[in-house]
Amino acid sequence: MSYPQDIQDMIDDFAFLSDWEERYMHVIDLGKALPPLSEAEKNEATKVKGCVSQVWLVSDKTGGDDPVLTFRGDSDAHIVKGLVAVALQIFSNRKASKIHELDATEILKELDLQEHLSPQRSNGLKAMIGRIKAEAAAA
């Protein structure tokens, strides 16, 4: 499947890692690299429902009929913050129509993440992706 170059680069980075533990540590490192949200941005409106850990997503849009959406996020759990970083890398800075077209399930399979996540983390990741897709649809 053909993905935008930044997504393909992420897939290639993950493919270079030989086992799940290395991938797990890479996900945590991605989360550590995220700039934190301000305390004011961590509120009920930005909180993602359906996540066991606390997760917040903030979006900005620019443009007209098919705006570019930029997402920022944070979590109170290291691995979940890394999953936020993965979701942001997949969806942020893209036109709303492109966000709608991206198949996150397939991308996560390419990253070999889905089968290694606990059901709660997997559900939380699905909730994040659902929120991002809903915001793209509303844009």
Image (tube, rainbow, N blue to C red):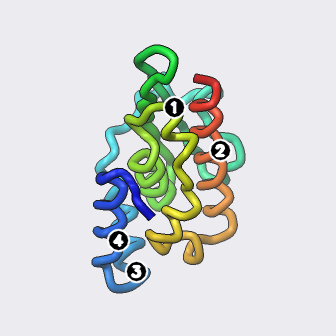
Distance from the alpha carbon under mark 1 to that under mark 4: 26 Å
Residue 10: image location, x then y, percent: 33, 61
Q: Mark 4 against mark 3, which lies toward the viewer?
A: 4
Binning the other alpha carbons within 10 Å of mark 2 as few (below 14), some (14 to 19) or many (20 upward) gives few
In the image, residue 96 sits, relative to residue 74, either above or below, namely above
Residue density around tag 4, few if under 14, some if 14–19, many if 20 or more, within 10 Å: many
Q: Identify which amino acid the numbered label 3 is placed on.
A: Glu
For the residues labelled 3 and 1, the Cα–Cα distance comes to 34 Å
* Residue placed under numbered mark 1 in the picture: 96
The tag earlier along the polypeptide, 4 or 2, is 4
Q: Residue at x 69, y 41 (%)?
A: 49
Inter-mark Cα distance, 1 to 2:
13 Å
Instruction: Give the camera-side residue of 27 and 136.
Output: 136
- Tell me the amino acid under the disc marked 2: Gly
Say which label, 1 or 2, has the lower sequence index: 1
Q: Which residue is mark 2?
A: 130
Q: Position of residue 39 (x, y in %)?
A: 46, 28
Q: Which residue is mark 3?
A: 21
Hey, what amino acid is under mark 1?
Ala
Q: How far across and down, in percent of the image, does residue 72 sit? A: 42, 35
Tell me which residue sits at (49%, 62%) in the image: 107
Q: Secondary structure at mark 3?
A: helix
Q: Earlier in the sequence, mark 1 or mark 4?
A: 4
Q: Is 72 placed above or below 41 here? A: below
- Tell me the distance, in whole angstroms, between the alpha carbons under discs 3 and 2: 27 Å
The answer to the question of whether label 1 and label 4 lie on touching residues, with beta carbons closer than 8 A, is no
Q: What's the residue at 41%, 72% (across, down)?
A: 24
| Placement of 137 over or under 115, stated as above or below | above
Question: Whole-Å distance between the Cαs marked 4 and 2?
Answer: 23 Å
Q: Identify the residue at the far top of this view.
A: 64
Whether residues under marks 3 and 2 lie with C-beta atoms below 8 angstroms apart, the answer is no
Residue nearest the viewer, comparing 10 with 128: 10
